[in-house]
Image (cartoon, rainbow, N blue to C red):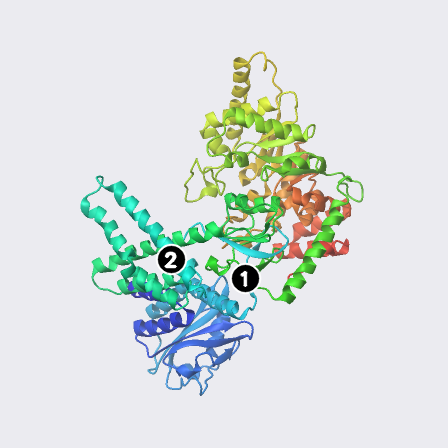
Amino acid sequence: MLATMRTIVEQVAQQPSLESALVVFVSQVKKAMRTECCSIYFADYSKDNFVLMATDGLNPGAVGQFRVGFTEGLVGLVAQREEPINLAYAKSHPRFVTSDLVQEDQYNAFLSVPIVHQRRVLGVIVVQQQAARVFSEDEESFLITLSAQLAPQLADAQLQTLLNQDGQSQRSTTLKGISGSPGIALGQAYVVLPKVDFSSVEMRKEPNKLKQKQLFFQAVAATHKEFSTLAASMQGHLPDEAVAVFEVYLQLLDAKSLGRDVELEIADGWCAKSALKRVIERLVQQFNAMQDPYIKERAVDVKDIGLRVLHHLLNTEKATKVYPDDTILVAHTLTPAMLAQVPKEKLKGVVSVHGAANSHASILTKAMNIPTVWGINDIPLLQFDQKELIIDAYAGRVYLCPSEALKQEYAQVQHHDAKLHDQFESEHHLEAKTADGKSIDLLLNAGLDLGSELNSARYCDGVGLYRTESWFMQKGTFPSQHEQEVWYRQVLSSYHPAPVTMRTLDIGGDKALDYFDIDEENPFLGWRGIRVSLDHPELFLDQLKAMIKANTGLGNLRIMLPMISDIGEVDDASALMERAYYELQQDAPDQFSYVDKPLVGVMIEVPSSMYLLKELAAKVDFCSVGSNDLTQYLLAVDRANSRVAGLFDPYHPAVLRALNGIAQQCQNANFPFSLCGELAGEPEGAVLLIAMGFDSLSMNFSSLHKVKWVIRRVGLAACEVLLHQCLAASSAKKVHRLVREFMLENHLGALLYTQKE
């Protein structure tokens, strides 16, 4: 059964359209289960019913015509229960309904399973036969497993079909993702493809056939040159028969072979990429159908050749592409390098298929104040290229090919946002003090936008988190001690005399250095933060010495150790710090006879550190809560995983209770504390944190003025009442409702965005 299942999945995946995929599916399932009928229904949520999409056994004329309501019939019951129904005599069931259109009166035995993807019922699979019998457990398991395997493929195929239809009719398509950096963006998609694959290619026709032929010939010539170079470089290092493989590749590229078929497709109106895709996928399918294992293996060669030609095709196009003035960057997985390549004045928004709203890449877009949506459906990216988009990064929605009415509506939302922003800016010079007189220090999370952050000193009370790893990420090798010293000195001087808290190198997880690869199966629970520094004392000592030297004569440096989970780590780090002082005094006694020793703190982001606050207070000078990682570890949610991104919620009662407990313990121990996670930059989060006793909050620059504006309009007593209610809530959903009501009662409703339906 496993081999049969794999064959069905592969055959469905190879189909060029949703319609043909479903026809193959029902035919193969009917054959595999030796039944007389197999049908598949898809859910149409716009009409609250299921539509028959394909059948092998019912009236073919009913496909696309027959519909049954969500609460009607056995199909509706399977979807309601989200579990299989297995009946020997279906007609005896009270929910059985029939129709002359489908012509299923002759069938008695009935087995049906739901197709579920990301908690949503996509459709229902039904198998039937005339003889009354209960399908076996093995048959039921086979159909359930097949449904689970095909659900993601069918979801993608459904969406791709919708995109193609809407692209031809100029209708708008809505895609749902996870909100990242908030805001609205209207612009033109610029697609970045880090990995070339034919699944990314959109089927598109082009009127200029001559230009498409030229593009194809250029790509073939580049591929030909590539293979010739490879063959020459391996001559003498490999047996002649191995090098001969490249000769076969070159022959396949010949105009009489692959090239001829692609030219015919271009002559039929297809663009070069689409023509190549059609030819390669057709050849691969033909080779895979062969019985001879040797011939079957040639499918791999054909696909490799095709991908190399496609790579050169895309490079040729990219060389002539320019970033539009209203660029919306669309990527499979966003990286800092992708952001850096776009001129800042042209970048209006970001859409990333993979990743999540709480990843470090997302934090970067927040620091840049770029509206971002993460974790949309995994669809061919080239469907987006050069098309108009609207990003609603409040509701986590992306609109492809939006209508004029929709563009006007969102332009008004942008205008509303701009007016609010002006209000926030108008009070930047005023104190961050609650309506009843409680002063709050608003600090900056810095180090991401290296080019512009140094101009923000006059707007904040200092830097609560300086991410030194961002400087390391900009380099091609580990920066020297002198390079680090120069940079740290510039940062400390820019904010002097305000304090600057520099976090020691914090790599690992989803933060990687190109020149220091960390490959782990579970990186967020692996080699991260202080663990890397302690395992590489030569790097740690270089960084500590650079910081200490940069602080000479300024005295506003504070050093913070990340990812502390054990007191022993603090002891080891402190010993290395003492060694750094000693070696500086030994190497340059005139300059460092006396060394300013900065305050040293730790990040509270690993749950174990919450229970060591008393011991930590005796070892270091302060602590700062990293609410992003703390939330991740408390809720067991990988914050870079789009599949579980919806479960990451810092307003979860367990997270709020943990933060409140930290604040109480620190107050009891007279241990200075602050918070530097993304929660501090959200007005609702800041309100709750102030009520807990956090009077020092660190955030991205884009949030600074907004949070100050809110603080000045709420009273501490009212915030404490809200906190008490939220701590008693049983779910994050209830917390969000309570916070929303509070914002409305305090005339802060303008900050609340109502999601569009």
The N terminus - image quarter: bottom left
The C terminus - image quarter: bottom right
* Furthest residue toward right: 436
User: Is 573 left, or right, of 296 in this rendering?
Assistant: right
The location of residue 346, given as percent across then percent down, is 59, 49
The location of residue 514, given as percent across then percent down, is 45, 38
Dot 1 alpha-carbon crowd within 10 angstroms: few under 14, some 14 to 19, many 20 or more: some
Dot 2 alpha-carbon crowd within 10 angstroms: few under 14, some 14 to 19, many 20 or more: many
User: Is 456 left, or right, of 299 in this rendering?
Assistant: right
- Camera-nearest residue between 728 and 503: 503
Q: Which mark is residue 30?
A: none
User: Is 597 left, or right, of 472 in this rendering?
Assistant: right
Q: Looking at numbered disc 2 in the image, what kind of residue is underneath it?
A: Phe
- Camera-nearest residue between 571 and 461: 461
Task: Quadrant for residue 627, please give it.
Answer: top right
Q: Looking at numbered disc 1 in the image, what kind of residue is underneath it?
A: Leu
Identify the residue at image location x=47%, y=37%.
513
The location of residue 79, given as percent across then percent down, is 48, 71
Q: Nearest to the eye among marks 1 and 2: give it.
A: 2
- Camera-nearest residue between 59 and 673: 59
Q: Which mark is residue 175?
A: 1
SS type, badge 2: helix
SS type, badge 1: strand
Residue named by callout 2: 216
Identify the residue at image location x=59%, y=56%.
187
Specify whether residue 641 is in view.
Answer: yes
User: Is 510 left, or right, of 618 in this rendering?
Assistant: left
Task: Quadrant for residue 202, please give it.
Answer: bottom left
Where 586 sits versus 604, above or below?
A: above
The location of residue 644, given as percent across then percent down, is 51, 54
Specify whether residue 563 is in view.
Answer: no
